[in-house]
Image (spheres, helix red, strand yellow):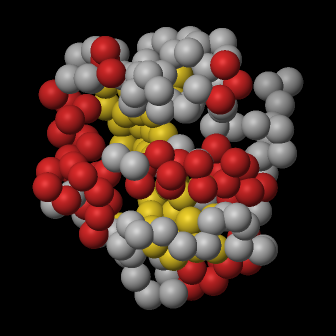
Amino acid sequence: MRRIIVLSFISLDGVIQAPGRPEEDVSGGFNYGGWSVPYSDEVLSAVMEEQFGQPFDLLLGRTTFEIWADYWPHQNGGDNPFNKATKYVASNTLTEHPWEGSVFLSGDVAEKVRELKQQEGPDLQVYGSSVLLQTLMQHDLVDEYWLKIYPITLGIGKRLFQEGTMPAAFSLFESKTSPSGVIVASFKRAGDVETGSFA
């Protein structure tokens, strides 16, 4: 069974929009694109290299796919893990693209993702894709979150956890702090939410 792993660069107030470039995603009047870049350091680089170094396929929303398809096919002479991965794209409007290895999912995306999880193959990594993420979380399809939590608040922008997120418990299985103050924290699904009382 394949895991669905959400890899997010996230601000303290939960924003995941456009961490990498100023013009990456300006929808909603977002003008802080590239907010993660000033915090880059050797620890974060090593973490990303390790996470990119294992076999994976991609599960992306249409907007993130189009942003990536404009950038990644041309990086490192085409020799990068995103070119090699199969890219599963949730979209009811986009049905084909010249980026090699792109497969489009339309209709009941949650059911199609469940089917993907049951197949043999590498884990499915999700980046960005704020709309798709809400569908995955509402249907309890996320197995792990690999988060990079940045010491910054942005006030506006697309957020990772929105109304409708399925209540779920997770356990922390890896954490470290980078010299620039970014907390790298990885969580895996750990059953249902439990409650109690201090009284």
* Residue at (55, 32) in percent of width and height: 25
Relative to the observer, which residue lies in front, 23 or 159?
23
In this rendering, does residue 91 appear at all?
A: yes
x and y, in percent, of residue 50 in the image: 22, 50
Task: Indicate whether 161 appears above or below 12.
Answer: below
Which quadrant of the figure has residue 109? bottom right
Percent position of residue 27, x then y: 65, 29
Choose between 44 and 130: the one closer to the eye.
130
Give the percent coordinates (x, y) of residue 88. Answer: 52, 70
Q: Residue at point 63% right, 37% down?
A: 160
How many numbered marks appear?
0
Q: On the rendered image, what quadrant is the C terminus found in?
A: top right
| Residue at x 41% of width, y 54% of height | 69
Whether residue 14 is situated above or below residue 143 in the rendered picture? above
Would you say 39 lies left or right of 41 here? right
Q: Quadrant of residue 83?
A: bottom left
Tell which of 53 and 132 is nearer to you.
Answer: 132
**x, y percentage for residue 90?**
63, 64
Q: Residue at x 31, y 51 (%)?
A: 72
